[in-house]
Amino acid sequence: MRRARMQSETFWCSVVLAGVAFFALYPILLIIVNSFQVAKPGAPALYGLQGWSAVLSQPGLKRALYNTFSLLVVRQLLSFPVAVLIAWLLARTDLPGKSALEFMFWLSFFLPSLSVTLGWILILDPDYGIANQIWKSLFGAAQGPFNIYSFWGIVWAHIGHNTTAVKVMLLTPAFRNMDASLEEASEIAGAGRAGTLVRILIPIMMPIIMVVLILAIINGLQAFEIEMILGAPIGFHVYSTKVYQLIQQEPPSFGPATALSTLVLCILLPLIVMQRRWIGRRQYTTITGRYRAKPIALGKWRYPALALIALVALVITAAPMSFVLIGTFMSLFGFFHIEHPWTLRNWSRVFDDPIFLLSLKNTVLMAGGAALFSVSLFSVVAYISVRTKFIWRATLDFISWFPSAMPGILMGLGLLWLFLDFPIFRPLYGSVWLLIIATVVSSMTLGTQLLKSNLLQLGMELEEASQASGASWWTTYRRIVLPLMFPSVLLVGVLGFIHAARDISNVALLATSGSRTLALLQLDFMVSGRYESAAVVATIVMALTTGIALLARLLGLRIGIRS
Amino acid sequence: MKHSGWQGSFCLLFALVFAALAGNAFAQAKGQKEWEALVAAAEKEGHLNIAGPPGDTYRLALVEWFQKKFPKIKVEYNGASGRDQVPRITRERQSGIFNWDLYIGGPTSPLGALKPLGAFDALLPEMILAEATDDAKWYGGFHGGFVDSEEKLYYAFDGTVSDVVYINTDLVQPAEIKSFKELANPKWAGKIVWEDPRQEGSGLNSALLFQLTYGEAFLRKLFAEQKIVFTRDRRQLTEWVVRGRHPVAVSLPTDQLKIFLEKGVGKNVKVLEDPGLVNSIIPGFGAFGVLNRRPHPSAAKLYVNLLLSKEGQLNWVTSSGGRNSRRIDVPFGDPEFAIRPNQKYIQSQSEKMIPQRQAIIKLAKETIPE
């Protein structure tokens, strides 16, 4: 009986492994192999290293890499400690209004990057920025101190957008899963709050902290929108803008872009190995049968802490959100002195667009589908990686990292080739289904690793007790595992939704007129230079996501762990 | 006899005129019949799939008018840049999928990647509307619009003349730059913004015109020494010039400037002329090819005939955000950038120019300091 169960488990785990490997690895292999293709269009295939050698020896690459790593290090040094502190305060303490504050960080993550960056330009432009104008009028200075077009301006635009917010979003549920008795034991042993945070909480949170850090590194290597806008005037180039330049060429240099993109893979692989080794050394269980979620009383620090977090939330959420909203009602974003600065025309242009309703329907379908598929697939992958004895579980976990290593447009190209190479997908070609698959694959790393980190916190004894009481695996999963994991499961669903709803790069090559989404409509407006209408579409996507996130949080608060 | 001679001549002339009129009427009747048959066949197909340029402006300009005229033919329009469109169509065709009827967009990508695959059919056999191919109606004759080397596959109907240098007149006076060669003067270092010539687009087009007029050394000097800001964000480029952050712009996008002008700003931005500069027509997205093995041949045929007719080009100049047509019987979308009959122009996006354009991209990559 036990043997049959083991065989069945191995079979199903192998099916999942094969499926994940097929969708996550095959497209990457295709584009890597094709990066050696040097023949001209229409000529027979010819393979060589010319594309690789040309791109790796291109001028300015070393400087771009230096800029990339400088930005990466500074951004993480500034944002990580702040995010850990905020997540701890939100999850572990009696901070007033913490649920609303936590949601503000979610909102910050939902904000469209272009509108936020334009908003920061409006405030911090060295010539006409509002902050500099105020400074000059207050102090009679010839020049204000702020310059968004600088290294520190780029750092600020990242931190002020979602560098901090996404970390808070990912870390808070994990901190919430901490058992209060660990903190109490630490304090009884004489450690102060700070000592407990540094010596107990952070080490035990290491799986999720490492996941967030690695994801931040990958994101830091791939982020280019802010750098493109703010770096261009000062000739500040980063690695990802180099990749972007290659992809933007006509015809696009996909081969050299792939060659350059493999750098992320080269950095990612040792990080994954390190992470697995680190996690393998210790136990990170925090939720056991004796779990207590008692919040720590902040005492006299309660209101100063509230003020600090409210200030951060205001700066990274309320200010950018007002940029976005104001932008949707402006005739020309940032021009307040024109005759008619305010208008509803941007909204009517969007609503009157003949493809708006279809795009909205497709977005809801695609993002909803992606959220459901993400949650289902990633929880299975995470469960296999953490809870089973499946011999290839480490490989499965390893593969789940790969989709994040490739820029979206290259991953989209790989998926396009995959879908066209296998006739089984032909009936789906051009439908929303392929877009769902593409967005689920591209968000696999974040979702899987988030759920995996949460599963690591979950003690086996709860499941063993349930099964010993006669509950089936499904009942145990439904009644024990799922409620404990629910906030994280919902977070993954929300992240899957927003990722799919906003995704342009992964779906640009796969969408047709019948399956176009709001993100592609937004791109249409941006290409036409109608940033204000693009901001309207982004606001609609944001509103959709916020609605979903609110529902998810209500559901999560009812079912999940409450602090 | 004399009398009968006159009568004979009159009869012959009458017979000739009658024959001509009858022939014309017959041809018209035949043409009308052919047209009606085409419309019926296209409506029977019920669909038309266009791989077109990105942006809502072009989507509306290329789809709405046709859709209104032929509501029974559903236009499936996928708007994307050549960068996205061409690799997709290439791979689809390699996999035996022939989804698209027409490719509308800038010539460089399709001529560079789709033409070598033999993806296009000749245009002329598709043309049945006599007025659409009437040489007298087009600048340079109808054939003047072909941009492929064989002059039969890829057709540029857009007739917008390229503009190169703009200034913010609050900060720079037109008299300060009489010839664009003066842009190499150290006085302008750090003051110029340019749509990145390391990728296809009008920034590259301007570089090509500079090279053709003033030579490679001039271009090299500009790229290497003038501390030019290169950007790919066309809206931002325009805003920088309007606000005076950069008072001189090479290849400022006029469609973007129009957005500012509509709102009452940007009146301080003026285009400069250099009489010595090579003149060029830059069709932008106003060019197309008929894909072979297309799923809806009749609808495609109907569309291209209508697109090149007076009606189609009238729609183009009125709804494409200020583009002009090579047709001379339609008004200008933007008179400032219209073809002037007494001037000579090159088609700077033609297939023959591709090697030169690629050489400039290479030069720019090597020379622009990073």
Image (cartoon, coloured by chain):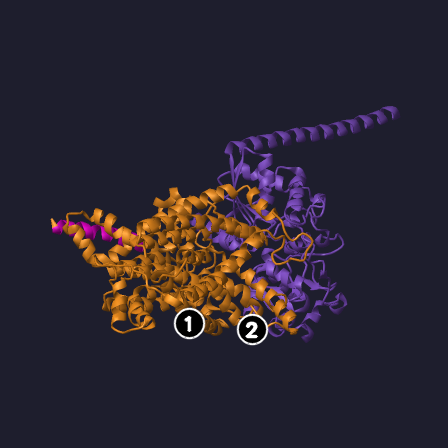
- Dot 2 amino acid type: Pro
At x 65% / y 67%, what residue is drawn? B246
Q: Quadrant of residue B9?
A: top right
Image chain in orange:
A
Residue A19 in magenta stretch? yes
Q: Is residue B257 left or right of residue B38?
A: right
The disc placed on residue B369 is 2
> Subunit of mark 1?
A
> Subunit of mark 2?
B
Q: Quadrant of residue A430?
A: top left
Between A22 and A403, the one nearer to me in the picture: A403
Q: What colour has chain B?
A: purple
Between A335 and A530, the one nearer to me in the picture: A335
Q: Is residue A167 left or right of residue B279?
A: left
Q: Is residue A279 left or right of residue A468?
A: right
Q: Secondary structure at mark 1?
A: helix
Outermost residue toward the front in this view: A300
* Image coordinates for residue B44, horizontal then vertical, percent: 51, 31
Which residue is label 1 attached to?
Answer: A77
Q: CA distance from mark 2 to mark 1?
A: 30 Å
Of tags 2 and 1, the one toward the viewer is 1
Q: Is residue A215 left or right of residue A541?
A: left
The answer to whether residue A510 of the structure is visible from this angle is: no
Q: Which residues are magenta?
A: A2-21
The disc placed on residue A217 is none
Outermost residue toward the right in this view: B2
Q: Is residue A485 above or below residue A427?
A: below
